[in-house]
Structure formats: structure tokens, C-alpha cells
Image: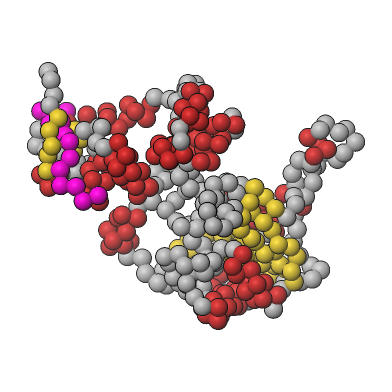
């Protein structure tokens, strides 16, 4: 039977009410770029009653591009057969593994503008070409060995369902959640009463937090003048101080723009220890300035002499150990004041839809190194600190 491709008005077709696939905005953006570059090369599949069975993301991309029609193939499927095809179309493509070598060769031959359309980001491409094992890549590329059964987790953000979920959960300022050993409050971290409420009399070993960098991103308190930003950071740090032990550590992320502001606030209440530099790949390439590929972490302590430093929990392999020098110690060395960890962008499995998410790789070492029990994060954001606390046996208190 020959199936005919026809242009169908988008307002005549409907999404499948039980489509199990979630299509994040990053995927829709890539599809839009693909449509602009290549046109429609893959028609939408419709049921007998014009319900989408394959192509929900393509239709959404077309709508956002302002298209009125889209190429479709109409089938005679309905009922259980239509539902089965919906699942089959999605699932069968997931089962097929990639050949790592062939994929690397294909990507290496593509110009940058075309490689970007494939959905593989620059970090993944670099890892493929160098033979590195990066878990996110290995979600898509297997060595054809059967996988161990594992629990399926939906890690995609539900940003497009925010209004719906808000009606269900009715999240509001002042809400307090106990999440196993961890506690989270919805509130203003510059208000000492909010911090006091989430701590419930407990005292933290460590404040590890990532406030807005004041670089004009589209969220609150990220586009302040110098005086406003100084006041904002001073209020946030001040609200946290009373929730700390006398030997606590303060670690605050920032970019070069606000280095002096953060230092000014922290130096007024604590002792400076070190400025730590996070170096990452995948920075934005600029034509009129040096590309930005690092961020900074202030390491300060409340006390000059009494503070937590769990050296044995953060040791790394030394150069002499790598060379097989039998005379060097076997425990490794304390890390330097810089670390190299990829940024989270593209299809990283760890990534959520948050504009400034820190990877676990730049949070976990400092929780291990500077805490024993409670960790306070007044700018919890995407929740990386909470996850790192769960993984390391600490208790997170977040705002």
C-alpha cells in the first residue's frame, strides 16, 4: 500500500492525549533550526481521526515558527492499534545503539554549524573524538552489550506544565518540605527568619552557595546596580551567619564582574583562605573579547585557626603516583585551587532547565572537604547542593 504525503493544516490535527514523550525546549529549538536548514524531511504520522502518532515535537516546532501547515501521512490506525504505533515509533529508535567510531568520524567531518544541529554538543563531540567515557554520551552510544535493568527516571523538567503543577501542589512562599534527611523552604534567603525556620535550631558546618552573578540574566536580582547588589549579597550572607557553627566555612560562587563585591562582603565576616577557579570547556566563542571559560569560588572560614578541612576525603592522584614512583605516598595529594569539569549544556543527563546549574563535579568535593553534618545553601537553585549532600551523607538545608 502506497501512503501519500500531504500538506495538512496544523489546526486540523491534535496531540495524542496520552503521548508519553516529553519534549524539552532545547529539543524544540534544535528541530526549528533543522527545519530552517533542511526543510521538512520527515512527515508527521496521523491516525484515522487526525491524532498525532509520530511528530509531536515537529508540530510544536512548526507552530512556534508560525507555520500553518505541515507534511503528514494519514493512516487508517485507530484505538489500540494507534496507541501501539505511538509507543512503537518512540521506543524502537531508543533501542538501536550507535557505533562510537563511525559516529565520531561523521561528526569530525561536519562543519561546526551543521554539527550543532545534530543534538551533540561540543563537549560530547570532543569526548567522542578523544575516546573519553562520558556518561551522557553513553546514554546514546552503547558498545552493543546488553544493559543491566535499571529504574527509569524522568529527569526532564516540567517547565511547560508549571501552571498545571502549581494548581496541584499549590507551592507558595513559606512552604517547608522535609525531603528525607534534607529540608527545603520556599522563601527569601535575605530574611533571617526564613533561614532560621529552615534550620530549626540546627547549625551548619558549611555555607556553599551560588548567588546570582548580576550579569543581566532573566531572573530576579541579576540586573542590579553596584549599590543594590552589594546590599543584596550582604543581606543574604548576613542572614546565614547566625545559622553557622563557630568553625564553619563559607564558599560562595561568583564571576569576575563581582569578585570585589563578594570579597568585600565575605571579608567583613570571615577569613579569606583561597580563591578557587573552575575551568570548563564549552564556553561561548567571542569575536571581540576573550572567551569566558571559568568561574570563581571564594573559600573563607569564620575562624582563623579552627575550621574543617577533611583532606583525606578529597585527595587526588599525584603526578608522581601517575608515573609509578614507588617512593611517593599512596594516599594522593590535596587538590590545587583549580578544577576542570565540563559545564552542563546540550544533552547532559545531569542537566535540568536552569540557567546557571552547577554540575555535581564542582559541588561534591567541597561538601566532602568542608562539612561533617549540615550544609546550608541559601540559593539552592537547581538543587545540586542537595543532591551532593544526599550522595555524601550530609544533610542539606536549602532556600
Residue at image position (38%, 47%) is 26
Residue 75 is a magenta residue? yes
Which percent across, then down, holds residue 232? 54, 77
| Residue 46 in view in this figure | no
| Residue 37 in view in this figure | yes
Judge whether 141 appears above or below 384 on screen. above
Front residue (pair 247, 299): 299
Q: Which residues are magenta?
A: 65-81
Residue at image position (75%, 46%) is 315
Residue 294 is a magenta residue? no
| Left or right, 167 with reference to 247 | left
Which percent across, then down, holds residue 208? 61, 62
Extreme residue toward the top, this view:
1
| Left or right, 182 with reference to 264 | left
Point out the image quarter for the N terminus. top left
Judge whether 80 appears above or below 230 on screen. above
Which percent across, then down, holds residue 5? 14, 30
Residue at image position (51%, 36%) is 125
Which percent across, then down, holds residue 384? 53, 54
Amino acid at each position: 500500500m502506497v501512503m501519500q504525503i500531504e500538506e495538512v493544516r496544523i489546526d486540523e490535527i491534535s496531540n495524542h492525549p496520552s503521548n508519553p514523550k516529553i519534549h524539552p525546549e532545547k529539543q524544540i529549538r534544535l528541530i526549528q533550526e533543522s527545519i530552517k536548514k533542511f526543510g521538512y524531511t520527515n512527515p508527521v504520522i496521523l491516525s484515522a481521526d487526525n491524532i498525532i502518532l509520530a511528530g509531536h515535537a515537529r508540530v510544536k516546532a512548526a507552530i512556534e515558527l508560525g507555520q500553518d501547515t505541515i507534511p503528514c501521512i494519514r493512516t487508517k490506525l485507530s484505538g489500540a492499534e494507534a496507541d501501539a504505533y505511538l509507543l512503537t515509533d518512540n521506543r524502537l529508535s531508543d533501542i538501536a545503539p550507535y557505533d562510537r567510531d563511525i559516529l565520531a568520524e561523521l561528526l569530525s567531518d561536519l562543519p561546526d554549524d551543521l554539527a550543532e544541529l545534530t543534538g551533540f554538543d561540543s563537549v560530547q563531540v570532543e569526548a567522542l573524538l578523544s575516546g573519553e567515557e562520558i556518561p551522557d554520551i553513553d546514554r546514546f552510544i552503547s558498545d552493543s552489550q546488553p544493559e543491566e535493568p535499571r529504574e527509569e527516571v524522568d529527569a526532564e523538567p516540567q517547565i511547560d506544565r508549571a501552571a498545571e503543577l502549581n494548581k496541584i501542589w499549590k507551592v507558595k512562599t513559606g512552604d517547608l518540605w522535609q525531603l528525607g534527611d534534607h529540608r527545603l523552604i520556599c522563601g527569601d534567603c535575605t530574611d533571617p527568619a526564613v533561614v532560621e525556620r529552615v534550620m530549626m535550631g540546627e547549625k551548619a558546618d558549611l555555607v556553599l552557595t551560588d548567588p546570582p552573578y548580576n550579569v543581566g540574566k532573566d531572573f530576579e536580582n541579576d540586573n542590579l546596580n553596584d549599590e543594590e547588589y552589594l546590599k543584596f549579597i550582604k543581606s543574604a550572607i548576613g542572614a546565614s551567619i547566625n545559622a553557622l557553627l563557630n568553625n564553619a566555612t563559607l564558599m560562595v560562587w561568583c564571576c569576575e564582574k563581582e569578585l570585589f563585591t563578594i570579597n568585600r562582603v565575605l571579608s567583613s565576616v570571615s577569613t579569606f583562605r583561597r580563591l578557587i577557579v573552575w575551568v570548563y570547556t564549552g564556553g561561548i566563542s567571542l569575536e571581540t573579547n576573550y572567551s569566558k571559560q571559568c568561574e570563581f569560588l571564594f573559600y573563607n572560614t569564620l575562624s582563623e585557626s579552627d575550621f574543617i578541612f577533611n583532606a583525606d576525603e578529597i585527595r587526588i592522584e599525584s603526578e608522581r603516583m601517575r608515573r609509578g614512583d614507588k617512593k611517593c605516598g599512596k594516599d594522593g595529594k590535596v587538590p590545587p585551587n583549580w578544577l576542570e569539569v565540563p559545564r552542563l549544556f546540550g544533552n547532559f543527563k545531569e542537566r535540568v532547565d536552569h540557567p546557571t546549574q552547577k554540575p555535581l563535579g564542582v559541588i561534591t568535593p567541597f561538601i566532602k572537604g568542608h562539612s561533617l553534618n549540615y550544609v546550608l545553601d541559601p540559593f539552592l537553585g537547581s538543587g545540586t547542593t542537595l543532591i551532593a549532600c544526599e550522595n555524601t551523607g550530609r544533610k542539606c538545608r536549602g532556600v
